[in-house]
Image (cartoon, rainbow, N blue to C red):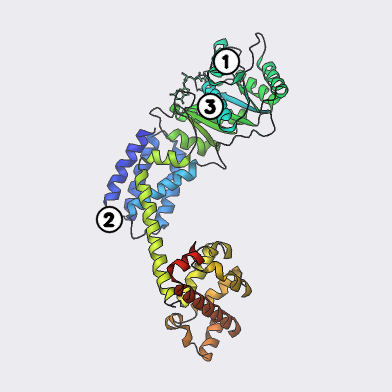
Amino acid sequence: MFENLSERLSGVFDRLTKQGALSEDDVRTALREVRVALLEADVSLPVARSFIKNVEKKATGAAVTKSITPGQQVVKIVHDELIATLRGEGDPGALKIDNPPAPILMVGLQGSGKTTTTAKLAKRLKEREGKKVLMASLDTNRPAAMEQLAILGMQIGVDTLPIVPGEDPVQIAKRAKTQASLAGYDVYMLDTAGRLHIDAELIAQAAAVRDVANPRETLLVVDGLTGQDAVNVATEFDDKIGVTGVVLTRMDGDGRGGAALSMREITGKPIRFVGLGEKMDAIETFEPERIAGRILGMGDIVALVEKAQETLEAEQAERMMKRFQKGQFNMNDLKGQLDQMQKMGGMQGMMGMMPGMAKMSKQIEEAGFDDKTIVRQIALIQSMTKRERANPALLQASRKKRIAKGAGQEVSDLNKLLKMHRQMADAMKKMGKMGKKGLMRGGLG
Ligand code: GDP
């Protein structure tokens, strides 16, 4: 899947990752090539543009950690941005089928794989969720299509609505609904007629069926190999009929990943499933991570970057912990924690971040800690000198007055901060004596 884009980007990143350092120019050069690659993969121009712009913004602002190369960092950012763009809200595989019988409307052009996908999804619902499913073909223009669904139904052991010659699609939809209610089906799937191109009649028919069935899900099936055309089809179907999701078929072929990216950006509709072959099991829930990994073709590098970042964080945490165990918890450490607290969105996020913090939450609460307090305490620490921060025991009454004044606060505020610092330092030391195991259990676990 997506070989074109994948190979292209691999080439670019191969060159990048071999360099030790990356200038802003290099980032730009790399992204220019990423952009060309996206366009070649049939991503539409505006989508490629906005994608690159986002990545550039993030890449330029991002700190490059020591243990990875800037090139790897760019890869990671491109990768993350791909996932963010591709991801919809919620679980793509979770179809809304409560309140039985739940109607699912299947729409799309002829040859997109609509009938096949209907049967694949029916099989999935039956096998994975134990649902009783009824399928009905509404393709009155093509008796062969109706028979095709019946044959697939027999193959997978899912019932199809008996074919009654002479009925129109709306009549069939009504009969499916009645049958599903009477016979206790959980889901009924309506496989609407397809045509080679979108025309007024096709849309009118699908809309009429939609109005009688009132579907919980309207899934648009599009051929993933058709690239930009697929996006146009999706836009039109969504405008005229309203769809709740897209199924991209033929993603097993040498598909150009661009369709997935553009589809998501332009229609705003979530991709729910991808078809990966002709067999009845060849369908998967859409996974942005997986698709992004395949687009980049370099999951190993992304994993490496993630590992490097983890290592770095672990190293920092360990260094900090060693100092705390020795009772070296100074004002700079406290400020570091307060800064982090702010970044993490206050107290809640902070709790799990720091060794022993969970144990101290009560003390902190008693100290009247809220986000405003954090800002004020940071201001106090900032008006101390470097030496005072490293060793707050140095603080004399006169210095305390000046520090409080410098931060626009009272000496009592500063005393509160100092008291909190002492309590925290004591607690750290105690935990240090409990040994590493105790610390892990007490704070990090
Ligand atoms: P419909 O006209 O939209 O109902 O399309 P069909 O369901 O009849 O599918 C047309 C052809 O595409 C059939 O030969 C299917 O087996 C094939 N097909 C459907 N989905 C996929 C897929 O995901 N991958 C591949 N390789 N073939 C598929």
Q: Specify the amino acid type for callout 3.
A: Val
Residue 443 image offset from top left, x and y in percent: 50, 66
Q: From this viewpoint, is residue 108 visible? A: no
| Rendered view: 39 above or below 119 | below
Some atom of ligand 1 lies within 8 Å of the CB belonging to the residue at label 1: no
Quadrant including the N terminus: top left
Q: Tell me which label, 1 or 3, sits earlier in the chain.
A: 1
Residues 314 and 77: in front is: 314
| Rendered view: 375 above or below 344 | below
> Quick one: SS at disc 2?
loop
Circles 3 and 2: CB distance less than 8 Å? Answer: no
Q: Specify the amino acid type for callout 2.
A: Gly
Q: Disc 3 marks which residue?
A: 221
> Quick one: SS at disc 3?
strand
Some atom of ligand 1 lies within 8 Å of the CB belonging to the residue at label 3: yes
Q: Specify the amino acid type for callout 1.
A: Ala
Q: Residues within 10 Å of mark 2 (few under 14, many from 20)?
A: few
Q: CA distance from mark 3 to mark 2?
A: 45 Å
At 50% across and 78% down in the image, what residue appears? 426
Residue 212 image offset from top left, x and y in percent: 71, 24
Give the numbered dot on residue 150. 1
Left or right: where 26 falls relative to 221: left
Q: Disc 2 marks which residue?
A: 20
